[in-house]
Amino acid sequence: MAVKSSFKNMVLCLFVICLVCSGLLAGVYALTAEPIRKAAEAKTNNAIAVVVPEFTGAPVMGTVNAGGKDYTYYTVSNKGLVSGYAIKTSSVGFGGPLELMVGLTADGVIYNTSVLSQSETPGLGAKCVEPSFAGQFVKFDPSKKKLAVKKDGGDVDAITASTITSRAYCVALENALDAYKAIVAGSSAAADDTCADEGCCGTCAENSCGMDCQGDVCQVEEGGCSGDCSSCSSSCEEACGECANESNE
């Protein structure tokens, strides 16, 4: 005997189908989530290695707000000194979002760039990934060159017939420079706080408080000072005051 069709039966069938499909999707996600995460992480790490100067250890991730927008960045160091920053930045090109990883040296020179994702027109704007265009940003000093296409009075050669993409690339780099300035400003403020708290004594990190120390600054203790100021620069010795004089006698 055939089962009569009814609204109740149809709803039940749809529910079972949805339940099975949801289970299948959840299973696929569980199987692919970790490989996708690892692939994205590897892509990010590869981009960092390409855009920053030589470094040791692992990049340290951070976030900074510049112009009302949050940026993810990675600080890299070499022999205890900050050697550069890799900053994730983006803008809108002709075909949609253009996402870059921009590497800057500690003094704000663009070291290199890498396109993380783009949806520009093949054969035109998509050429932004090619060295013929991106290569001009290697060691690009924004204090000496204008970060804009030549059509807008800058020093950047635009991709032929793709001015919009070229401008978007420059905008993404400008955004990275804004983020860099915010990072440096935050680092300087933190160093100033340390300087005020410790009176520029105790263990001195490289470039902290504007000093170029190569070792430990003398420590002020009750009844005198300990440590050696001879390995520090003159500005560091001045900060140590009498302790520096004692160690030099």
Image: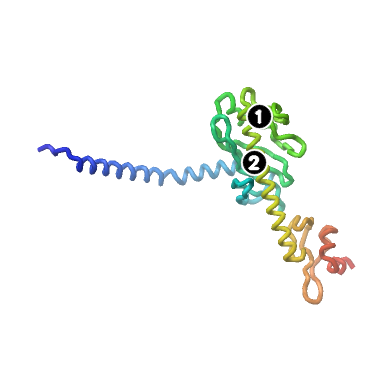
Taking depth in this image into account, of 150 and 59 the one nearest to the observer is 150
Callout 1 amino acid: Phe
Mark 2, other Cα within 10 Å: few <14 / some 14–19 / many ≥20: many
Q: Is residue 174 left or right of residue 16?
A: right
Residue 217: x and y, percent? 78, 64
State whether residue 58 appears in this view: no
Question: Of callouts 2 and 1, which one flags the residue occurring earlier in the amino acid sequence?
Answer: 1
Identify the residue at the far bottom of this view.
223
Mark carried by residue 218: none
Taking depth in this image into account, of 213 and 124 the one nearest to the observer is 124
Residue pictured at 81% horizontal, 60% vertical: 236
Numbered disc 2: secondary structure: helix
Mark carried by residue 175: 2
For the residues carrying marks 2 and 1, which lies nearer the camera in this image? 2
Q: Taking 230 as reference, is 70 above or below it?
A: above
Residue pictured at 70% horizontal, 29% vertical: 152
Numbered disc 1: secondary structure: helix
Quadrant showing the C terminus = bottom right
Q: Residue 105 lies in what quarter of the image? A: top right
Q: Is residue 227 left or right of residue 158?
A: right
Callout 2 amino acid: Asn
Taking depth in this image into account, of 57 and 30 the one nearest to the observer is 30
Q: Residue 118 lies in what quarter of the image? A: top right
Residue 191: x and y, percent? 72, 58
Residue 239: x and y, percent? 82, 63
Q: Disc 2 to disc 1, how far (Cα)? A: 19 Å
Q: Taking 112 as reference, is 247 above or below it?
A: below
Q: Residue 97 lies in what quarter of the image? A: top right
Residue hosting label 1: 133
Mark 1, other Cα within 10 Å: few <14 / some 14–19 / many ≥20: some
Residue 151: x and y, percent? 69, 26
Q: Taking 127 as reference, is 18 above or below it?
A: below
